[in-house]
Amino acid sequence: MAAAAPLVSIITINYNQPEVTRDLLVSLRGSDYDRVEVIVVDNGSVDDPIPALHRDFPEVQFIRSEANLGFSGGNNLGILASRGDFLFFVNNDTELEADTITRLLATYADRPRLGALSPLILYHPEVVEGQRDLIQYAGTTPLTAYTARNRTLGERQRNRGQYAAAHPTAYIHGAAMMIPRRVVAEVGLMPEFFFLYYEELDWSERIRGAGYELYVEPRARIFHKESVSVGQHSPLKTHYLTRNRILFMRRHRSGRPGPFCAPWPGI
């Protein structure tokens, strides 16, 4: 007898952006994979959007947090409420193609040691003047020990099929990442002290350290409006990127040569 198709828990966070979240939920209704549960965590929005959203999307499970728990804390609430064999974390400012989930699951079927997987992430047409083929993410290089920076593959390139097959990446992308429940059970929940940014890099390190592979599947695509909640160049974004770069390097690169080996004052 054929095995049942796996249940996929799609987890997203809303923070003062109900119309953006609504666009995502509409796109999820167009998916060709129907063994899903959709979980929206409202992360302490000023006005509770759940009653209105639930009225229009009764199939969705909504969770309200009265406090803003950050990206990691909000997603952890979703994990604890989920039942899926696979957890698919997507930003609320993304929209999926119909076959995105199907293609990601097919890649897992081909790679038994695959621990985390991101699709090809393209900029949403709303942010690049109607274009649908401008790449935001096709994988990354590792962070260097000296600058704590890396390079994003394909960034702002036209998608001409140059990334045609699934390939390894140093880090998955927090805007869209699929992880089997058994892997999360093994490596643990998202670290909540980051609050915003670098959580997926920490997870990537821990998943790789447990002996799993990290991949990008370019045949699965998602469109990203990018930084709708905090703004592309906001002081909040700059603060957490800088703070968490230091925290990440202290946590994962403390034994390697370079400026991040030195003791850092408390943050």
Image (cartoon, grey):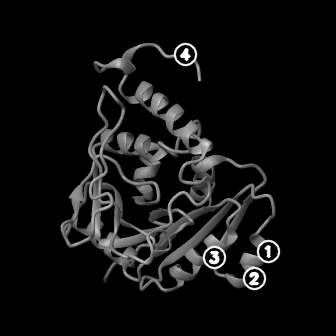
Q: Earlier in the sequence, mark 4 or mark 2?
A: 2
Q: Which mark is residue 51?
A: 1
Residue type at mark 4: give it: Pro
Q: Nearer the viewer, residue 255 or 145?
A: 145
- Residue type at mark 1 is Pro
User: Which residue: 41% across, 79% down?
Assistant: 97
Total count of labels: 4
Q: Earlier in the sequence, mark 2 or mark 3?
A: 3
Q: Is residue 105 visible?
A: no
Q: Which mark is residue 22?
A: 3
Q: Is residue 264 above or below residue 122?
A: above
- Provide residue 40's location: percent of width, then percent of height: 63, 66
Q: Is residue 237 left or right of residue 217?
A: right
Q: Secondary structure at mark 3?
A: helix
- The residue indicated by pointer 2 is 55
Q: Position of residue 126 (x, y in %)?
A: 50, 73
Mark positioned earlier in the residue sequence (3 or 1): 3
Q: Amino acid at mark 2?
A: Arg
Q: Amino acid at mark 3?
A: Arg
Q: Residues within 10 Å of mark 1 (few under 14, many from 20)?
A: few
Under circle 1, the secondary element is helix
213 and 67: which is toward the camera: 67
Q: Earlier in the sequence, mark 4 or mark 1?
A: 1
Chain-order first, disc 4 or disc 3: 3
Q: Which residue is mark 4?
A: 265
Q: Residue furthest top?
A: 263
Q: How far apart in space, not on screen, are marks 4 and 3 (Cα)?
A: 42 Å
Residue for point 22% across, 64% down? 166
**Callout 1–callout 2 Cβ contact below 8 Å:** yes
Residue situated in front as seen by the camera: 133 or 11: 133
User: Gap between marks 4 and 2, in whole Å?
Assistant: 49 Å
